Amino acid sequence: MEATRTELQKHTKRINAVLQETCDASAPAPLVQLADGTIGLAASCPSALRREVTTDLGLREIALRLPIPDTRNPRFWIALQEQWEWKGKHKACFVQCGLRLFMGDRGEEAVQFLRLEWVAPTLHGGVQIYQGTHVGHPHWHIDRAALIGPVESFLSLETLTAPATQVEEFSEATSSSGSTTVQPLLDFSWLQTVHLPARAQWMELEWDGSQVPGPHQCEPNSLNELVHWWDGALRYVSIELPH
């Protein structure tokens, strides 16, 4: 998909309008900006609406607060970007876009737990090949922080810090012999590499498991379609997270 500079500027304004509504942030300054082919959160975004976070890859970026549970006590944060490659002075080609969800109060480090990504294919011998060959595009990623709950987190810490000898405890976890042994938890870290398709047409198009592109792989057909995708994704997580 290609777009002119003017079209991208209008597209950026439309994304900003979606964020203004879903994040309940009627800020005077834009929440997102277009710079060097990248649409991302603006550094001029009011400090009350943003914070610095660390991605699952260890990179620092700006995230915008979601009004969950409310605007005064945000618990969830969202970072997003959209990348285009310039094919001249006035026209660019879509490369990728995505959002990252973080959780954490203002007084603690926010942790990334979920991603939604959409990467355009590249041409190889006249055939469109997507990143990962057969993986879904767009797709969700479940990140490390989402793989454990508070009980499992505590048990994992207890496993790492427990002394070699058994310690007597009086709790529901205490065995009949009066001692407790904490069993290591199953390792689900591999789940971070699994791509969960966000748009698949398996009910309409048969797939033999090897054909590429597959019915779970596509790229945006237009800027209108892309902004609708942003709109739907942001509204969906805003509805789901409070549950």
Image: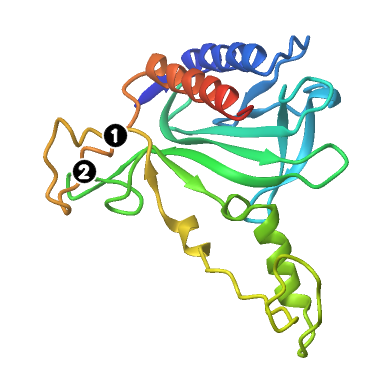
- Left or right placement of residue 205 versus residue 217 in this view: left
Q: Which mark is residue 213?
A: 2
Q: Secondary structure at mark 2?
A: loop
At 85% from the left and 26% from the top, the residue drawn is 47
Give how far across and how far down residue 179 sits, in percent.
Answer: 74, 82
Give how far across and how far down residue 191 sits, in percent.
Answer: 47, 58
At 17% from the left and 32% from the top, the residue drawn is 203
Give how far across and how far down residue 118 sits, in percent.
Answer: 42, 37
Read off the residue under disc 1: 218
Question: Among all residues in the image, which is located at the extreme right?
Answer: 107
Q: Nearer the viewer, residue 182 or 176?
A: 176
Question: To which quarter of the image does residue 18 belong?
Answer: top right
Q: Amino acid at mark 1?
A: Cys
Q: Nearer the viewer, residue 13 or 57?
A: 57
Question: To which quarter of the image does residue 183 belong?
Answer: bottom right
Give how far across and how far down residue 24 sits, in percent.
Answer: 71, 13
Classify mark 1: residues with Cα within 10 Å, few (<14), some (14-19) or many (20+): some
Q: Is residue 118 above or below residue 186?
A: above
At 76% from the left and 86% from the top, the residue drawn is 166
- Quadrant the C terminus occupies: top right
Q: Is residue 216 above or below residue 93?
A: below
Question: Among all residues in the image, which is located at the extreme front?
Answer: 176
At 57% from the left and 22% from the top, the residue drawn is 239
Q: Mark 2 or mark 1, which is nearer the start of the sequence?
A: 2
Q: Amino acid at mark 2?
A: Pro
Way the structure is coloured: rainbow
- Quadrant the N terminus occupies: top left
Q: Which mark is residue 47?
A: none
| CB within 8 Å, label 1 to label 2 | yes
Q: Nearer the viewer, residue 74 or 36?
A: 74
